[in-house]
Amino acid sequence: MRAKLSWWLMGLAVAGLLAGCGGKAKKAITEAETAVEEAKQAEAPQYAPDEFKSAEDNLVLARDQLEKRKFKDSRASAITARDQAYLSRDRALERKKTAEAAKQETKALEYNVPSLYGEEELAGAGKTATEVSMEDQAKAALQDVLFDFDSATLSDEGRSILAGNAQWLKNNPGLKVLIEGHCDERGAEEYNLALGQRRAEAVKKYLMSLGLDESRLKTISYGESLPLDPGHTEEAWAKNRRVHFAVSQ
Amino acid sequence: MSGYPLITHRRDRDASIRFLRMATVSLLIHGLVIFSATLYSRRSSAHSFRESSILVTFHESPQTLPGPPAGAVDQVPPPGGARVTSPAPSQSKPPAQSSEKVIPKDPTKSEIKTGGKSGTEKPVPLTKAEQASMDAALDALRRQVAGSEQGAEAAEWNAAMAEIGGSLQSRAYHQQAGQVLADAWTPPIGVAGNLSVRVLVKLRGDGTILGWTLIQSSGDAALDASVERLFQKVTKLDPIPWANPGETLDLPIEFRPGSGEN
Amino acid sequence: MRKILLGLILLLAAAARAQEPPGFEGDFLVITKTPQRFPVAVPNFLVNSTSADDQAVGQRLTELLRQNFQYSGVLQILDPKSYLTPLSSGPEDFSAWTLIGAEALVRGFLTRTPEGRVQIELRLYDLARQEMVLGKRFTGSEAALRQMVHRFSDDVLEWLTGRRGSFETQIALVSDQSGRKEIHVMDSDGGNPRPVTNNHTLNLAPEWWPNSSRLLYTSYKAKNPDLYVLDTFEGKEWRISNRPGLNVGAAFRPDGKRIALVLTPREGNSDIFLLNPDGSGLTQVTSSWAIDVSPAWSPDGKFLAFVSDRGGTPQIYMLDLSRGAESENNRPVRLTWEGDYNSSPAWSPDGQRIAFAGRRAGQFDLMVIELGKGPGGSVRALTETPFNEEDPAWSPDGRSLAFASDRYGNYDIFSISVYGGAARRLTEWPSAETAPAWSSSLKR
């Protein structure tokens, strides 16, 4: 009587174990199926076909192996299927975004832009259409501030330009601005780098005094290396002795 | 004070002592002469001046002498003797006492040219004409002396004349020798301007350079080497006029690169 | 009467003896002469080959040797047209060379080894001693031929003056030939130029690490002027300072242990700081509200020359670092008092002078301050052209200066001997080349 019971128990245990192993695999397969479903909704078969196919194949394989009671292999395949499915979902989302952006850009260009905005250039890769048009707006709105030779002192005209610039920046609060200091080509390179830095800092300080937050303002000096006008005349030099504004999000 | 080249001369020691005695006796008079001459001087002298004014005194001619050479600054002013000679007059009027002098004036004597250009250029040697007139003056003196009463004084005259003549001869020779060496020397560029090399050259009377020794290195190997190279090129100078061909003489020389810009 | 006269004469004789005859000092006959270029004859290389290419190579090497000697400022190449002797590889006929005024003769021989490498033999003859005093044989690839000639040129200078030349060196520079400023490196005669950066941003102010093939330079490739070290041999690179604002104008202390550079930590005010080559150990040197840039070390590392506009215009100052940083008790001494813009100081390797670019009448000229001639030294112009001469950099032997000049249109790099003579043009591109830096000697 006792022996029979223990045999039954053992048999149950074994069955239970077998059932358990199979249970893990089944669980994995279920997860994979969910993932594949999500990928489908993200349009992965369209935007990430390779990854999606790999996920599906692995899923089929997992089911197969489960039938053949190869639980370990089945589980592994199911996990792979799940990972591939999520990968394909992510990729698909990314690519969809880029495609949309491209569509938007084309739309923006086709739009009849008024002369205030530049329309000649595409923004760099990765920029959205909104960013591009914002840069163009800024280019038009934020004027350069000019300086006398070997000076970093703001003139009255400079201050009024900065007042206008400050106002525009306040109206566009999400933007950060890079304040670039430049010099004309005369004089020593190192000294001009320091002078350009001084000019940029003077402008930054003034903008802060007009109420702009420091966290939005960054300075850099290019010295004499990036002239606006490559000429060697007084007019060219006057244009190059400047602080220029470049915005970013 | 040996303000004189080490080319040795025979010298009568006793005569020397007697000379000095006489010298002290007439010191006052001489001092007056020089002092009054000083008042007429326009420039400070170079030594080449002094040479001329001696002859002027001999010839009793108030010659107007040209000024010192431009490069006189390169040469160190005479020590000791400066008191006596340095304010040498460019135009020395013979003092009142000159009437005491009996040295005849040599009408043929021409002006002695003094010095040349900068110290880096060659010193001007005496021309043959000048040499000849000097000799003539000395001869006249000797004739005078020969007719004097005291033979001893005559001897003193002779010795004095010989010394002066010898000194002039030696000077000329040195200038010529210096010129030959300067022409052949190539001091290298880039050496510090205040250095100098001192050597002692052994000469034979016929002018052959028997050898040379480095007395004092300049501290710059390249400069020393340039002097070494010079003596490899130049092995003979002119024969020495007052020495016997077989005699050996010492000539100390100092080589200086004239400062360029550096 | 006679006695008085005799006394007179004797005194004068004594005086004649006492004073210095011309050319004499004490016992010495003094011979003074201005230093001169040493006359050398450099006939054509003898090429042991009938190939026209090899003949051309031999000719180019001859030209290179002649130009090295001529531009050194210390040697004079005698006109090749005056050379009388037909060239042979046999014993030399020295008299023929002495006849034309040469004091030394250099013979070169070029052969190709069976393996296809090249071999050149260079001999220097001292014509006073009538013997060979220097002889070298170099074997290597054709690409190395120029460096062989450079090495021999340095040897000849060492024989003549006791100090090696600077021909076997490299010069780093900034060139915008690609459209953006990049760092390039070339031989001391302008040969074999090549770019060492290629990041299409802005690259400035190269400076050599002493006795090394490494370069310090400032680059905007990380969107800020940061300081990098580049090993031109291995191509490796790393950044040592990327503080906000400027990290520029780096200059190595000659012992290689500290770097001076310009930072702008306080509201854009540029000051000079010191840094270890690994980026640690930052200390401040200048602390004025003026622009302080362009540090230049004295050879003993005790002084720093720099440019400051604390007096109103850019002028050159000097600080005694042995007394610490700038303070009430340690003020920088101003060295330049003329002109409204004096910049780019460069201290000579012997410590005797500082070269700089001074603006006179609207153009920059190369000028030199002779130190040790009283406070402020004495200043003289090294170049005086109606064009700009800027960015002086000393050769390691202190005999030459590299600089940038726009005399032919766009800026080019030139070198000139401090003993005078023509400037040697080192770059001939239509772009602008500036900021030369001269390496230490490559010979180890």
Image (cartoon, coloured by chain):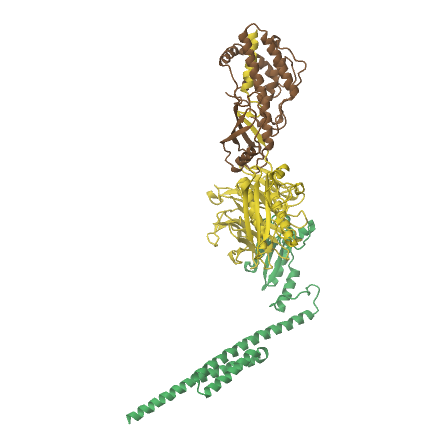
Chain colours: A green, B brown, C yellow
Which of the pair A111/B25 is nearer the observer? B25
Farthest top residue in view: B149
Q: Is residue B152 left or right of residue A224?
A: left
The answer to which image quadrant residue C339 occupies is top right
- Residue at position x 52%, y 80% from top? A55
| Residue C244, position as x, y percentages in the image | 53, 56
Residue A54 against residue A141 in the figure, above or below:
below
Residue A90 location (% of width, % of height)? 54, 75
Name the spot of residue C368 as percent of width and height, x first: 58, 40
Q: Is residue B179 visible?
A: yes
Most foreground residue, C362 or A107: C362
Q: Find residue A52 and report its image quarter.
A: bottom right
Residue extending farthest to the left is A2
Farthest bottom residue in view: A1
- Residue C359 x, y percent position in the rendering: 63, 43
In this view, the residue farthest toward the front is C90
Quarter of the rendering occupied by the N terminus of chain C: top right
Q: Is B232 rendered above or below residue B81?
A: below
Q: Name which residue lies at 51% across and 85% down.
A: A60
Can residue C396 be seen in this snapshot? no
